[in-house]
Amino acid sequence: MSKILIRGAKVLGGEPQDVLIDGSLIEAVGTGLSDEGAEVVEADGKVLLPGLVDLHTHLREPGREDSETVLTGTRAAASGGYTAVFAMANTFPVADTAGVVEQVYRLGQEHGYCDVQPIGAVTVGLEGKKLAELGAMHESAASVTVFSDDGKCVDDAVIMRRALEYVKAFGGVVAQHAQEPRLTEGAQMNEGIVSAELGLGGWPAVAEESIIARDVLLAEHVGSRVHICHLSTAGSVEIVRWAKSRGIDVTAEVTPHHLLLTDELVRSYNPVYKVNPPLRTERDVLALREALADGTIDIVATDHAPHPHEDKDCEWAAAAMGMVGLETALSVVQETMVDTGLLTWAGVAERMSFKPAEIGRATGHGRPVSAGEPANLTLVDTEYRGSVDPEGFASRSRNTPYEGRELPGRVTHTWLRGKATLVDGKLT
């Protein structure tokens, strides 16, 4: 059936309205819309958002299909309310050529649970020594506009400058993993009281902040765009705030786990809490929430980082860094930002759909819920509250820090260009 009537939904958290979908587009938004010839979805006051967009996802394919594939990762995305994800370049082989990014792009098209936009590597092999084929990746079928060596920092200032100059020609953006490598050698967790008490190598905040400071100045110098991945410290917030006050073209993201979890959890030595950048202090968490609320931090990005069981179920020092996040992101944002009064649902739409789509140039995504727009939509039961059970995840991996934790909100429906990918909480 080509027509779908979503009846009684709170569009962006406002008053209940009806939304009529015809084919791939929204035909009308209003009250008392006719359901003639349409499949009816009774929203019963659930919140309707534009489809979420994640600017920072690890899909692992090609090369690490034991962790995730484009299929399982996009199914996880649809379960979490996402209609588009940007796939990071640290695959095997690295996505540093037109051929690899086109492979990832086509896999996304084949599976159809959400749109997949590949991110190209900044340097060949993520080695930080030579620029990758930035122009060729942009001109490929994947039309890459975001470039990142995420997982590694582009620590050479000359290479970073050249990358910023190169992408400026076609309106691209370099997304930096801000981590000065010499300051984090042997680091296992946030440097502070807890690391000192546990005897674990500390990861100082200045390792992140020094790179951000350098890169916003480089972006100002060449007049290009820079995006800061997974910002995690109060000091980083102040640097970005200062840069924006100068008119520097910088955007920044925060992960859900950095909005909720602190380094106190590392006392358990449970490797599920081992992540890059590390969980920080309560002071940092509160600063990140405030910065997301006031717009200093532009977006929420999951940094969905799946790992197989054997890479996380081991001693702390040997465990891989990273957490899955696509299927819990919206719930964590509701817990930390909406239920605390820091953001409205319209603010969530801005930070999890409109703005990430704008930064990444995701055509057709991050659009208003209004007539004539693509029907990329997410319906959320905000009254729901339940315990996180990773056994029910669509992701191939289960390395979530929220297992057994009660979180609010549940995505019940997701539509990609009018096609239901999730219905009543079940993938189609």
Image: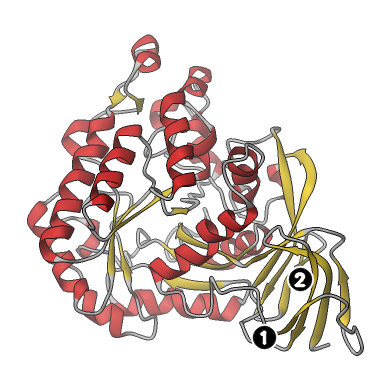
Q: Is residue 312 left or right of residue 199?
A: right
x, y (%) of residue 255?
A: 47, 45
Task: Provide the secondary structure element on which disc 2 rests.
Answer: loop
Residue 375, image x and y in percent?
66, 79
Viewed as shown, does residue 350 lie left or right of 29?
left
Residue type of the residue flagged with mark 1 = Leu
What residue does disc 2 label? 428
- Image: 53 above or below 236: below
* Disc 1 from disc 2: Cα separation: 19 Å
Would you say residue 160 is visible in this rendering?
no
| For residue 64, side relative to residue 252 (left or right) | right
Q: Which residue is mark 1?
A: 25
User: For the residue labelled by badge 1, is the local secondary structure a helix, a strand or a loop?
Assistant: strand
Q: Earlier in the sequence, mark 1 or mark 2?
A: 1
Q: Quadrant of the N terminus?
A: bottom right
The correct choice, above or below, for 42 with respect to 259 in the image is: below
**Type of colouring:** secondary structure
- Residue 188 appears left or right of 4: left
Q: Quadrant of residue 97?
A: bottom left
- Asked if residue 269 can be seen in this view, the reply is yes
Q: Residues within 10 Å of mark 1 (few under 14, many from 20)?
A: some
Q: Is residue 428 above or below residue 139?
A: above
In this rendering, is residue 261 above or below 376? Answer: above
Residue name at image x 26 percent, y 61 percent: 249
Q: Nearer the viewer, mark 1 or mark 2?
A: 1
